[in-house]
Amino acid sequence: MTSLEQQIAADLLNIGAVSLQPDTPFTWASGIKSPIYTDNRVTIGYPAVRSRIAAGLASRIITTYPDVEVIGGVATAGIPHAALVASLLNLPMIYVRSKPKDHGQGNQIEGPLQPGQKVVLIDDLLSTGGSVLEAAKAASKEGADVFGVAAIFTYELPDNVANFEAAKLPFLTLTNYSSLIQVAREQGTINDAQLDLLASWREDPHHWG
C-alpha cells in the first residue's frame, strides 16, 4: 500500500465519502447487500481533499498514459475531477453524458474532440465498471481513441476486473477497497472481526450477508 493510497483512503473515510456498516449492510439498487456505501461527490466540497485527488490523478495519468491528448469526465461525478486534472495537465477536456441529449443537437459528448485523439476517461468510482465502459463506447463512436480509465476508488469486485478485461481497456485508481478497510482498521473504525467480514464481501458480493 503506497502512502498516496493510504492518504486518499483516509480522506474518503474522514469526510464521510465512504461509510462502512459491516453489521448492518446497505442494499444497493441492484439488490446486492453491501457493507460499504460510497458517495465521492462529497469530495468536491473539501478543497484539500479534491486537490490531493486531482494531483494524484494527474500524476498517475501522465505516468501511465503519457500519450494522453484529452481528459474526459464521465457524467456526472467524474466531471469536476476531470476539469481539475485537465487544468493541471493543460489538456483539453470533454465530458460524456449517460445518454444523448433529447433536444438541441442531441450531443452525448460535450467539448472539442478530434477523430483519433487519445482520451483518458475519469470517473469517481469503479463498481462493475459499467458506466465508464459505456462512456468509453460512446466516445469511441465519436472517433475518440479511449485508451485508459482513471478513478478515485474501486471496490475491486471480480465483475469490474472481468468487464475491463473483456473491453481490453486498462484502468488505474488512486486507492481501493483493500487499502480502505485496512486504514479503517488502523483508525479503530472497525475491529478485527468486522475487517474479516468486510474482506469476505469483496470476494463474493452476490452471496454475502
Image: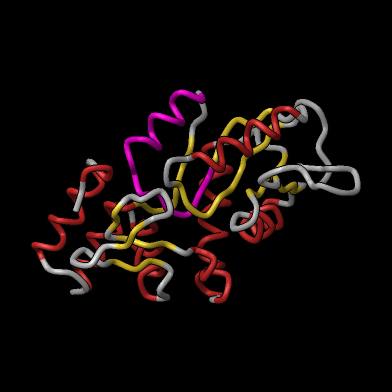
Q: Nearer the viewer, residue 125 or 82?
A: 125
Q: Position of residue 161 (x, y in %)?
A: 38, 33
Q: Residue at x 72, y 38 (%)?
A: 69
Question: Picture coordinates of residue 85 (x, y %)?
Answer: 64, 55
Query: Would you identify the image quadrant in which residue 8 lies?
Result: bottom left
73 left or right, relative to 162: right
Magenta span of residues: 150-167
**Residue 151 part of the magenta-drawn span:** yes
Q: Nearer the viewer, residue 102 or 139?
A: 102
Q: Can residue 50 be found in the magenta stretch?
A: no
Q: In which quadrant of the rendered view does residue 118 lie?
A: top right
Q: Residue at x 69, y 34 (%)?
A: 138
User: Which of these two is toward me, 27 or 161?
Assistant: 27
Expressed as whole percent of the image width and height from the top left, the position of residue 190 reads 18, 69
Q: Which x, y percent locates residue 176?
A: 35, 51
Q: Is residue 152 above or below residue 109?
A: below
